[in-house]
Image (cartoon, helix red, strand yellow):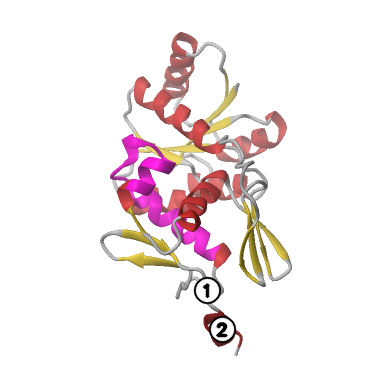
Amino acid sequence: MKVLVIEDSPQIIEAISLCFQLRWSEVSVISSTSGNKGVEMVETESPDMVILDLGLPDIDGLTVLHDIRSFSNVPIIILTVRGDEMDKVKGLELGADDYIVKPFKHDELLARIKAVLRRTTMPQLKDTEDVVISPELKIDFTTPCLYKKGQTVNLTPIESNLLYHLVKNEGKTLIHRYLLERIWGEEYSDATEYLKVYIQRIRNKLEDDPSQPKMITTERGLGYKFIKPTPKMLTRRSS
């Protein structure tokens, strides 16, 4: 496995490299101290994982994240020393798979990397059939993607898994902790910011008007519920 570290501190790059040498020798580490070069290396080196610092000397790390996501779905963990929760949420919204706050311990970094790899390489749900939500909307969990009004909309592994649990439990409220533990793992049971970001990402792909969701509703303080649209709802939306 190849890991690309985009970080302006040579000391941190060296520490991460040493961590892999001692604890996970099958991993090869490549690095860049600038954001622009890091984006280029994602294209030329095809890493299996990117560890991205948000505080880079040439361009903002969030810009680097946005640029990478414009052409690649490589798993990305962002590093930050920033205390503002909005930076973390913004990173998740732009497509980061996880974040870790500096300073961090080697065990924590390795655990996060392995957790992200588990989530982003989840096996396809081969035993499921296409789920027809309405005449204009179908979900294929084996691909995974949506077919919406004649267009194909791809789903990431996490989006697909989260949507699968919601659709499978149609009409039931799934509490935050249940969804977090099923999708991200027990160590993420209180990390509701992950859930909020991914629910919004699914709504943006699924709903006609994500600001007024009809299919994935919020049960305030509890969790989320999937509601299959009725013919009456569909008629109202098309009128």
Disc number placed over residue 141 in the picture, else none: none
Q: CA distance from mark 1 to mark 2?
A: 10 Å
Q: Image height check: is 75 above or below 153?
A: above
Q: Image height check: is 118 above or below 82?
A: above
Q: Position of residue 1 (x, y in %)?
A: 60, 21
Disc number placed over residue 229 in the picture, else none: 1
Q: Amino acid at mark 1?
A: Pro
Q: Secondary structure at mark 2?
A: helix
Extent of the magenta region = 178-204
The image quadrant of residue 122 is: top right
| Residue nearest the viewer, comparing 107 with 133 | 133
Tell me the mark number nearer the camera, choosing from 1 and 2: 1
Q: Residues within 10 Å of mark 1 (few under 14, many from 20)?
A: few
Say which residue appears at 60% left-offset and 38% top-offset.
74
- Asked if the residue at tag 2 contacts the one at tag 1, i.e. Cβ–Cβ closer than 8 Å, the answer is yes
Q: Image height check: is 74 above or below 177?
A: above
Disc number placed over residue 237 in the picture, else none: 2
Say which residue appears at 48% left-offset and 15% top-offset.
20
Left or right: residue 51 versus residue 81 is right
Dividing the image into 4 quarters, which one contains the C terminus?
bottom right
Task: Report whether residue 55 is seen.
Answer: no
The image quadrant of residue 46 is: top right
Q: Amino acid at mark 2?
A: Arg
